[in-house]
Amino acid sequence: MEEKGVAERVVKIGAVRVGEKQPPALIAGPCVIESAELCFRIAEQAEAVCRRVGVPYIFKASYDKANR
């Protein structure tokens, strides 16, 4: 329900729009970056699954364990 004078809350992350009245998207990745190779492997696999089921994918990861 939209209140009068309140804008719809939507954020654009790359080509994906996330927020009110938007389809679900998956934001996922490793908690800590162990290597670039592992990040690319995770991103490629997650993207392939999301593409198959029609869900937008946004990769996320932390460079430091304390950032989780």
Image (tube, rainbow, N blue to C red):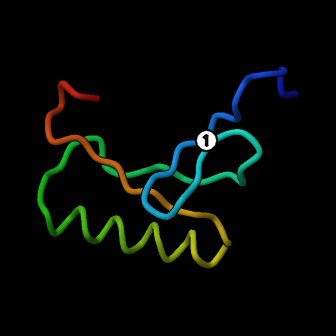
Indicate whether 67 appears above or below 42: above
**How packed is label 1: few (under 14 Cα within 10 Å), some, or many (20 or more)?**
few
| The C terminus lies in quadrant | top left
Which element is circle 1 on? strand
Q: Residue at 14%, 64% (x, y): give it.
A: 36
Farthest residue, direction right: 1
Q: Nearer the viewer, residue 25 or 5?
A: 5
Circle 1 residue: 10
Could you tell me the amino acid type at mark 1? Answer: Val
| The N terminus lies in quadrant | top right
| Numbered marks: total | 1
Q: Residue at 61%, 41% (x, y): give it.
A: 10
Give percent across and percent down for residue 4. Answer: 84, 21
**On the rendered structure, is 39 left or right of 44?**
left
Give percent across and percent down for residue 48. Answer: 49, 77
Q: Nearer the viewer, residue 59 or 4?
A: 4
Q: Residue at 28%, 71% (x, y): give it.
A: 41
Give residue 54's quadrant in the image: bottom right
Give percent across and percent down for residue 31. Answer: 29, 41
**On the rendered structure, is 13 left or right of 1?**
left
Q: Nearer the viewer, residue 56 or 39?
A: 56
Q: Residue at 22%, 28% (x, y): give it.
A: 67
Give percent across and percent down for residue 26. Answer: 55, 53
Farthest residue, direction front: 5
Q: Nearer the viewer, residue 14 or 61?
A: 14
Indicate whether 61 appears above or below 2: below
